[in-house]
Image: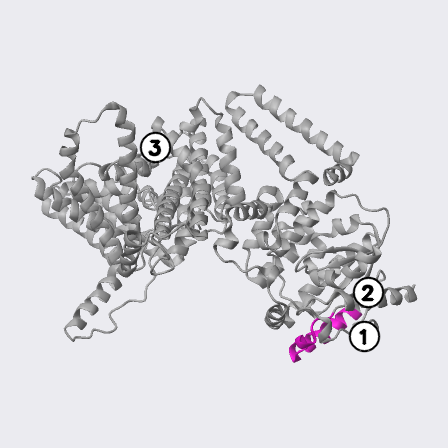
Amino acid sequence: MLFNSFVFPVFFLIVYIIYRGSSHKLQNRLLLLASYVFYGSWDWRFLPLILLSTVVDYYCGLNIDKFSDTRRRKTYLHLSLLVNLGTLGVFKYFNFFSDNLQSLMSQFGLHLDGLTLDILLPVGISFYTFQTLSYTIDIYLNKSKPERNFLNFALFVSFFPQLVAGPIERSTRLLPQIQFPRKITAAKNKEGLWFIFWGYFLKIFVADNMAKISDRVFAETAPQSGGEALMGMYAFAFQIFGDFAGYSFIAIGVAKLLGFDLMTNFLFPYFVTNPTDFWKNWHISLSSWLRDYLYIPLGGNRNGSLMTYRNLFITMFLGGLWHGAAWTFVIWGIFHGVLLSLFRVLKPMTEKMKISSTYLPITYALKVVIMFHLTCLGWLIFRAESLQQIVAFLQAIIFNIGSMTDRLQYYVLFMIFHLWLLCLIQFIQKRKGDLMALENIQWCPSWIFYIMMLYSMLFWGEFGGQQFIYFQF
Amino acid sequence: MHTVVFLFQQITSHDLVYLAAKAVMIIAIFWFGNKIRPRWHHAANCIVAVLIIRLFLFDNIFSWYGYQRYLSADDVGWRQKSVIGYEYQKFVKKSEYTKFLAVGSSQTGAVYGPYASRHGSPKLFSLAGMSPLDLILYRKYIKSFGPDYILLYLSEFDLARNPSLDAAKIAPSQGLYLINLYPFLREVAEHSQSYTALKEMLVGEFLPEYKYAFIFSGIRDKILGKNQALAMPIWTEIPDDLSLQYHLQNMATNTSMEVIDVNNRILTHFLSYCRDESLKVIIVEGQYHPLGYTDKSLALHQVVHQNLLNIDNEFNNVTFIPRTEVMNFTEADYKDGYHVKPLPAYQFVENLMVYIDSME
């Protein structure tokens, strides 16, 4: 059941009406049932897996808290890690590793056949396994207490707005909202409706239209010209932002209507000036998860520069691998590790440079443009079908930028047509540092923006129920 | 200037009353919205803006004339171009008397068009790819002509063709009649194994912006030069022999015995509506390129022909004229798989009019 399908609004309306008329306890039961219906609508065979994760982590959480003996606590933590990461490993990475192993063995003349599994990747598995892992790890680290009510815990794991594509919530944020009655205020409703509206705008108008260009460009192993390669990269950059951020905002908005506050997952990733800030604006729930449960436990930046770079590489390597079982994702992760490390090296030097205040806006703009293009380079690696395609695109950009053909001109105009409103709104939001900034602008009534967004969606939006990109993760 | 004058002349008192009523409603919403709590001002202003925009975009002859002039079938699609024409025609005053109204697909247009353009009769209402379901969906518009006779041109090409809801989204709003229609729509959706078109149609009932989005996509694509940039095929320039091959292939693959029953029921539903509205119908048995007469199509023809005979017996407002009674088209008479050339079409209708006169 996709957010941008015809079925979801009907489903949510039914749930919402019953929800508003129910007591707190009934609300939780209703949400749990709705979450399982939502998840089961993808494929009912996925349900036992999420149930397994729920039961194991509920049991492990209670036992980690119950025992003071470190060995026993570790045993239960390891059990939780084994089940969650094991499930993820089997369903997501088994074929990837076995294919690579077969390929490696064949170099030595050994042939290993029949090592692949014919299995479906359960939707959202990367998200909910990380969410439940954070629960057991937090209990182990004494940062939180276990949830004793199994049904409440099951709802924490399966809460439908954020189940299949995040944000990846922490138990310290979400569980208390489940445990205690929620207040649904007019302000929350307003925010919820805005986020849903904004999310649909990003998905239907921005992402699915950008997909037309990026799919067309990336359908060919080698692009017609460097200009088209660039357009394909830019288009994908906005496609993935619109797609993923759109989903997150719809999830946040839906949750707000139910009285829940989910964490912000996206801010202004294409207005940043360095890679560190990029990861504070992009997929914030994942980057903060990796920081808290991987980077910091590895030592973070506490043990000198070399160890810091090592930790950054490991974190980003695994972050890339989290996205999918392919070498392009791994390289993408390593690429961001390189960027983060380079930034750490260059930062002290750049801070020493004195720039006249007259040139500060230009410098800022230049940094934004450079960082945007570095991000797009990463997206090229992320989106490419193969390493050969990455090489072909880079060669085209560097050696064959090409001339302005009709097709290239069409791509440029098409992108300007579909992106100008997004860029304007994001600029306003960034200036005010507030995702609700449109409510408070002085120079134009906000309803004019709402009308423009509404008509953009109705006239030029894609209502074909296109899959969200991050569902494949 | 002449065109502008013509367009202004089409505005009737009924149109003015309608526009005035809408203006009053908009003002009322604006006034009321700004009188109630401030948090509802945005919502009220949005509603007012939407209603005003709808007036400009959809509720006047000027806009539809503009869309019709600016957009071609290559920009928006054949059916969509027909629908724009239909929407424009809704605003154009109809002559007082219509004896014959020919209704059907572009095949019907090709048959009746040459005679109609010379003699002013029959009046013509054709939509690209019009199907039996479209007869029901456009029934009110058909009735608005006030014809003595509705001329249909039907064969197995129409009645054995796989039904589809693809064009239902851009059909006129059905309002409460949707309840009557829903079983047919559901059945067609099941046959075509796609409920998306049905859902789109239901959404389009409430949102003309969604229904007519193809106009604005077409405008965008035309301004941005999409067809030229992406080397899209120019359907209006496809050679006739290629069209013939495509049509024959289409007929062979998109017709089947299984769908005759549902199409027949849809047709009889329309004929019942005509009977209830005292509209007489003449079903002229249709033809297509003789190369399309395969064993399969002849088998389909037998069933469809018998169904049409049964309809003739069942409905006292319907007359069925078999193809053998008027004129048989030959290969040389066809431009492509479906559409006859002007001269044989003219002769056909001339013969038909004589035949109808002899019946009266």
x%, y% of residue A459? 54, 43
Residue matched to label 3: A180
Q: Are marks 3 and 1 on the same chain?
A: no
Q: Give the SS element for disc 1.
A: helix
Residue matched to label 2: B349
Q: Are marks 2 and 1 on the same chain?
A: yes
Q: Does the magenta stretch include residue B16?
A: no
Disc 1 marks a residue whose amino acid type is Thr
Disc 2 marks a residue whose amino acid type is Val
Q: Give the SS element for disc 3.
A: loop
Q: Residue A87 carries which label?
A: none
Q: In which quarter of the image is residue B298?
A: bottom right
Residue matched to label 1: B324
Chief secondary structure of the magenta span?
A: helix
Disc 3 marks a residue whose amino acid type is Phe
**Can residue A169 be seen?**
no
Viewer-nearest of discs 2 and 1: 2
Q: What stretch is highlighted in magenta?
A: B287-309
Q: Residue at x 26, y 47 (%)?
A: A130
- How crowded pointer 3 is (Cα within 10 Å; few <14, some 14-19, many 20+) is rated as few
Viewer-nearest of discs 3 and 1: 1
**Real-space Cα distance between discs 2 and 1?**
14 Å
Chain containing mark 3: A
Q: Does the magenta stretch include residue B303?
A: yes
Q: Residue at x 91, y 64 (%)?
A: B357
Chain containing mark 1: B
